[in-house]
Amino acid sequence: MSTPLLDSPPHSRDPSRPVPWRMSGRTVLLVAAALIAVQLVLRGWVAASGFFYWDDFLLIGRVSAQPLFSTELLLTSHDGHVMPLAFVLTWLVTEVAPLNWAAAVVVLVGLQMLASLAVLRLLVVLLGVRTWLLVPLTFYLFVPLTVPAFAWWSAAVNALPLQIALAWVSADAVRLVRTGQRRYAVSGAVVFAVALLFFEKSVVVLPVAFAVVVLVAYVSGGSVREAVGRGAALWTAAGAVLLAWSACFLFVIQRPRGLSAPEHSGIVWGRAMSDGLVPALLGGPWRWERWQPATPWADPPGSMVALSWILLIMVAAWTFRTRRRVIAVGVCTVAYAVATIAPVVLLRDGPSTAGLLLQSMRYFADLAVIATVSLALIGLAPPRTRPADRTNDLVRQQVSANTVRFPDRRPSVRDHAHGTRAWVPREAGRARRLAGVAATAVFVASSVYSTVTFTRSWEPSPARTYITGVRAALPNAADAPLLPQEVPWNVLNPLAFPENMTDRVFAPIATPTTFALSTPRLRMITDQGAIVDAQVWWNRAIIEGPEPRCGHRLRDTTAVNLPLSGPMQIRDWTAQLNYNAERDGRIALSFEGETETIADVRAGLNTVYVRLLGGGDTLRIRSLDQPQSLCIGTGPVGVTAYSQ
């Protein structure tokens, strides 16, 4: 016995029975292409308004410091994520255009185009080329759920491949069940493997594809068991991929923090749903809040939150009342939303942290694909039979016998389950179409408004000012190396040390002599990216040495202690060495017992500034050249500051 899942979608298999108000297949595809083009233009503006942010600099620093095909790079655990292909993509962009946001924008828009086309392909597979396809497609293209994850490079290289895989593998699963062609099993397994290498959350792709096959068979009135059996090749191939990936993931993964129970988890869940997810499904949240350097988070007006819940409940009730077999679709969609929220609540613990992360909505991006599939399945489900349908049966019989004419009536969309047509008044059909077009227009306008308000909140970027300034200043500062320093806190937090140091952040555009741990000229980079002269504070001082007119004398390679005026805690310090050298050479300087820093010295009376890590009340210095003779005078040891 054949299941409807194995056949072509309704309306694509019977073009001889058109519905007068329905668009032709060519028109539908042209409208779909136009909608995707509009989305890409809008997303291009969103991306161009932003810049590299926070974790982006961590990724860029790592790809600049490690060889591309090294386990240190590809198998590193980044904040609990294992994502080798995300590092590869970051490496490619950095190699082609280092710290160039325009190149990143091109890649982001390209990934979004692939995701939109994959969703269009899935909808064509599920529904055929018919007018209803444009409804879920419009939802996916413009819903604000996907915007925050798209705008941030580090989030996008996770979220967009996941969206592509959800749509592509689900379409392959349905095509495999319908046609039995094994190439869809191979294609689905390959895309699944690629998605896993971008983002570990892609483990959801296989169960989602399985659920899509089951739900398509169920809402179409077919055999679920037969459909699942016909997809066995994909379940087996993708399952093998998942097992192999899981073994590697569990070996590599590192939990960045201890697991603890979240504070006020009920409040977190409620705010995630009411302030983030529900308004976004209807084109919200309309208003965003941001405290630098955090990402924007949803802050919808309370009245709009209440209205969103009311509308969502009304739409769900109307759908369940008018369509058969769609309750399972709703249950699966809600279950996926809960499964999306739960890991963030449990793993991203800390006061207010989980709530703000969820309200940023970047963790909901993949839910847009799930909701799109749900809308498609609702369109695929048969309408419920009403008492008036018995009268319609009589009308159809009379029309068939050419005994009764109703010039004010016209056929509606064919009942997919029974292969018949329900008859509705022309005015009612026109009113429904106008209502649907109006609702879609309101949704798109609301979504675009939310996208614009997000972009305005996201656009201010201290990192853009800082990076742009440094890029312009570096060529004019090549006469002496710069000592590494921390980037501004609103570019990268000190907790990211040592990735927040300038030599790591600017590694893609730096030359081998741009940064060093010692320099004959002390300069600093300001928060605006300018390079200015600096000085060392006298937090402590090198005590004057015992030898008159020399201070501390250094002969051959014998180490000499330089007492300080007081103890220093362990951290980064800069020592200003005022010296008189007999000849050019090299010295090694350190806090007693700490790692040495190598510095060049020049013949004559000079100064060298040395970056040291450590603490204590004594510096230790030695020459690396046997015949050297060096006098060290007093000088400051402390933090560096701009010269006044």
Image: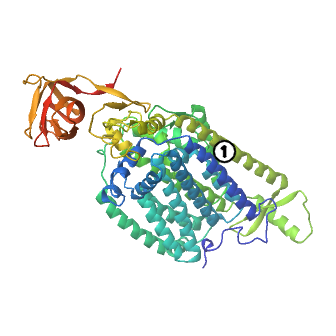
> Residue most toward the top?
644
Q: Is residue 431 above or below residue 638?
A: below
Is the residue 613 above or below the residue 337 in the image?
A: above
Q: Nearer the viewer, residue 192 or 485?
A: 485
Q: Quadrant of residue 567?
A: top left
Q: Position of residue 525 (x, y in %)?
A: 38, 32
Q: Quadrant of the C terminus?
A: top left
Colour pattern: rainbow
Coordinates of residue 73 in the picture (x, y in percent): 34, 55
**Residue positioned 10% across, 24% down in the render:** 545
Q: Is residue 125 left or right of residue 93?
A: right
Name the side, left or right, on which 508 lies relative to 191: left
Most foreground residue, 269 or 195: 195
Is 563 rendered above or below residue 585?
above
Give how far across and how far down residue 480 sits, in percent. 33, 37
Q: Quadrant of the N terminus?
A: bottom right
Count the numbered circles shown: 1
- Residue toward you, 379 or 454: 454
User: Circle 1 is placed at which residue position?
Assistant: 443
Mark 1, residues whose alpha carbon is within 10 Å: few (<14), some, or many (≥20)? Answer: many
Measuring 40% from the left and 35% from the top, which residue is drawn there? Answer: 352
Identity of the residue furthest to the bottom in this view:
1
Q: Position of residue 123 (x, y in %)?
A: 62, 62
Look at label 1 and name its amino acid: Phe
